[in-house]
Amino acid sequence: MPEPHIRAALPSDDGALSRLDHDTWSFLHAVAPRQEPPFEPFFDARHRPDDYLIAEVDGRIAGYLRTVPPTPLACNAHVRQIQGLAVHEWARGRGVARLLLRAAMERARAEGAVRMTLRVLGHNKPARALYESAGFVVEGVLPGEFFLDRQYVDDVLMGRSLDV
């Protein structure tokens, strides 16, 4: 597979990103029920194209990562939070998520952020391993925060400094 190209999302990516979300849905990472057609638009007032980075391979979207300020408060404008990461099955194991993470951290630094945080489900061992390998550490756990697929699942809070 050729090296993925990372770019900003465009409004025209809406349909492809909606399909990607549907195709990759799993209780491993999703807390909302699986959407059924007709699908809502991917982008809306809270989920703007500017919030997303896209990984493309040969003109096909391989994955995305969404980062936003965690709150609208000026007192934590120095933080960016990852609020979505998905990679197509055909692109997994090829470093797509790692490239998206690296690009998101670079963009956050360029915007003046000094810290990045995220939330990941406790049972999502592949995602937790990825984040740990990228320098994120567990900063808190909300035990049994979600009831998914007939089991209680922890909400794990992770973070890292963006100092180089």
Image (tube, rainbow, N blue to C red):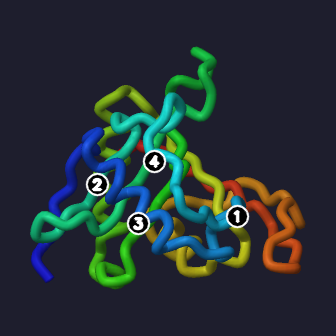
Q: CA distance from mark 3 to mark 4?
A: 10 Å
Left/right placement of residue 148 relative to residue 134 reads right
Q: Residue 20's mark? A: 3
Secondary structure under the numbered disc 2 in the rendered image:
strand
- Image quarter of residue 29: bottom right
Q: Decide which of tag 2 and tag 1 comes sooner along the chain.
A: 1
Q: Residue 33's mark? A: 1
Q: In the image, residue 134 lies at what x, y percent?
A: 43, 64
- Which of the pair 66/132 is nearer the observer? 66
Q: Amino acid at mark 1?
A: Pro
Labels in figure, total: 4
Q: In the image, residue 72 lies at what x, y percent?
A: 60, 21
Where is mark 4, residue-wise? 42
Left/right placement of residue 120 relative to residue 134 reads right
Residue at x 21%, y 49% (from the top left corner): 7
**Contact between labelled residues 4 and 3, with CB atoms less than 8 Å apart:** no
Q: CA distance from mark 4 to mark 2?
A: 14 Å
Q: Residue 96's mark? A: none
Q: Amino acid at mark 3?
A: Leu
